[in-house]
Amino acid sequence: MSTVYLLGAGFTHAVLGNVAPLNDEVIGRLKLRKYSELETEYGQANPSIEQFLTLLDLKLARAEQRKYIGTSRLRKIRKKIIERIVDVFSYERLYIDDLDQKEVLKKFVLSLPTPALILTLNYDCVLDQALWYSGRWSPYDGYGIRVPSDEEELSTKNIRLFKLHGSVNFKERSDDQEYPFVEINNKLFPGAFSERNKRGSSHIIAMSYIKAFRNGLMRFWRDAIVAMREAEHLIIIGCSLRDEDTFLRFLLYNFGMKKSCDTFKIDIVDKGKKNANAIKKKVEGLVACPKLQKISTHDKGLEHYLSNK
């Protein structure tokens, strides 16, 4: 059975605890009150980082269209905010140094079937590290981006990790047609014996409803859609499926299209019946062939779900 995982911010929060912020906790860590130009937007959007960045993008778009004198200042502010978001999710802040000390995370990575495709909307590298420590995955080819390596034994073993909104260890490059560079170092991936692509700004797609993807990341979405059409089992963990994320909604629409399959299975893992049922309702309205879908909710969280698999 071909399995696809879809992970949101709730996943990292479940395996690391409160050190990993949920979406509505991010805005409080960015020190945005210092920007008087955005006082109105902050007041309207708080605590939603998505709404705040959307209002900022709309304000910047209007300023650029009208050639407003403060446009350059707004661009610099936006860039600084993105840098702070990267810092919130950086591998210096969110990391593991011993997989044995993270029981839930270890249980998750060892439970992965092969082949498996993991689609994550998260910027952090916690899961990346866990997969590396487990010996089941490699950053040299596991992202869907081939990174040259002298180590022949480093392979994904049929586990792929697509970071659909970018990552703190994806680095910008000037060629818009290509994938970003992948940063690999021994702090992030101990024992990799490599220091690659450490320079440059992190390549992430900000949490705005207005998303501008470079072609490299769009290829991730294309490949994810192909995989979703061929999958029979979808596991959604800690992902609220926000209505405003059109790309994600279209991706989910493709699950259930496999011609040779009569039934499909969806597991929704979250904390609380209200949250899990809300996600289930959204899923029912998004996936293809809903009458063929067997949807199960697991509202006691990831640890309980893994213990009862």
Image: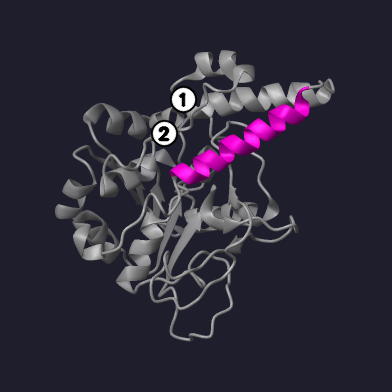
Q: Main secondary structure of the magenta part?
A: helix
Q: Please rate how many residues cluster around mark 1, counting C-alpha atoms within 10 Å: few if below 14, some from 14 to 19, many from 20.
A: some
- Looking at the rendering, the stretch of residues picked out in magenta corresponds to 70-88
Q: Residues within 10 Å of mark 2 (few under 14, many from 20)?
A: some
Residue tagged by mark 2?
Answer: 23
- Residue drawn at point x = 55 percent, y = 23 percent: 34
Query: Residue 160 location, x and y as percent?
Result: 45, 64
Q: How is the model colour-coded?
A: one colour
Residue 178, image x, y percentages: 70, 61
Q: Is residue 187 visible?
A: yes
Asked if marks 1 and 2 touch (Cβ < 8 Å), the reply is yes
Residue at the far front in the pictured view: 34
Label 2 amino acid?
A: Asn
Depth check, front residue: 168 or 251: 168
Q: Is 64 placed above or below 213 here?
A: above
Q: Is residue 11 magenta?
A: no
Give the numbered dot on residue 48.
1
In this rendered view, identify the residue nearer to me: 119 or 192.
192
Q: Is residue 303 left or right of residue 11?
A: left
Q: Residue 60, relative to residue 126: is it above or below?
A: above
- In reply to whether residue 73 is colored magenta, the answer given is yes
Looking at the image, is mark 1 or mark 2 earlier in the sequence?
Answer: 2
Q: Which residue is depicted at the point 41% across and 49% down?
A: 6
Distance between the alpha carbons at the discs numbered 1 and 2: 7 Å
Q: Residue shown at 53%/85% (left/top)? A: 150
